C-alpha cells in the first residue's frame, strides 16, 4: 500500500511546526511518523496545510488513519468533521468506555 506520494518538498509547512514542539520537524520521517503528521495537520492545519497533506499522503492513507486512530487521536469535533467528509461509517473505537461528556468518575 502506498503511504506517501513523491513530493518536491518533504518538509512540514512552517505554520505547522509550532504543533510539533516536542519533535525536531527536520527529523520527522514521512513514512514512520505518518500518523503523527496526519493527526497534527487534520487537527491544527489551515486549508493550505490540509492541501499540502493531501499532496503528501493519499486519500486512502488519510482514511486509514481516521479509521484506525481518528476517534482516539483527534478531538471529537475534528474527528466527526473529517469522518463525515470522508463518509466513514465504521472505525476502531476506544477500548475505554466513557459516559457522554464525562472523563472521570466523581
Image (spheres, rainbow, N blue to C red):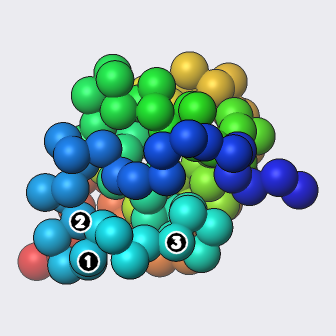
Verify CB contact (< 8 Å) between mark 2 and mark 3.
no
- Residue drawn at x 33%, y 70% is 26
**Cα distance between the residues tagged 2 and 1:** 5 Å
Q: Indicate the quadrant where residue 20 lies.
A: bottom left
Q: According to the image, label 3 marks what residue? A: 29
Q: Position of residue 45 (x, y in %)?
A: 29, 37
**Cα distance between the residues tagged 3 and 1:** 11 Å
- Residue drawn at x 21%, y 46% is 14
Q: Is residue 67 left or right of residue 49?
A: right
Verify CB contact (< 8 Å) between mark 2 and mark 1.
yes
Q: Helix or strand or loop: what does disc 2 sit on? A: helix
Label 2 or label 3, whichever comes before in sequence order: 2
Q: According to the image, label 2 marks what residue? A: 20
- Residue drawn at x 26%, y 77% is 23
Q: According to the image, label 1 marks what residue? A: 23
Q: Helix or strand or loop: what does disc 1 sit on? A: loop
Q: Indicate the quadrant where residue 49 lies.
A: top left
Q: Helix or strand or loop: what does disc 3 sit on? A: loop
Position of the C terminus, as image quadrant, is bottom left
**Cα distance between the residues tagged 2 and 3:** 13 Å
Q: Position of residue 17 (x, y in %)?
A: 20, 56
Amino acid at each position: 500500500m502506498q503511504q506517501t506520494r513523491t513530493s518536491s518538498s518533504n518538509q512540514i509547512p512552517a505554520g505547522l511546526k509550532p504543533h510539533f514542539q516536542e519533535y525536531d520537524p527536520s527529523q520527522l520521517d514521512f513514512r514512520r511518523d505518518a500518523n503523527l503528521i496526519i493527526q497534527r495537520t487534520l487537527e491544527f492545519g489551515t486549508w493550505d496545510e490540509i492541501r499540502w497533506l493531501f499532496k503528501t499522503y493519499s486519500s486512502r492513507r488519510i482514511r486509514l488513519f481516521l479509521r484506525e486512530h481518528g476517534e482516539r487521536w483527534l478531538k471529537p469535533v475534528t474527528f466527526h468533521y473529517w469522518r463525515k467528509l470522508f463518509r466513514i461509517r465504521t472505525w476502531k473505537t476506544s477500548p475505554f468506555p466513557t459516559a457522554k461528556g464525562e472523563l472521570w468518575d466523581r
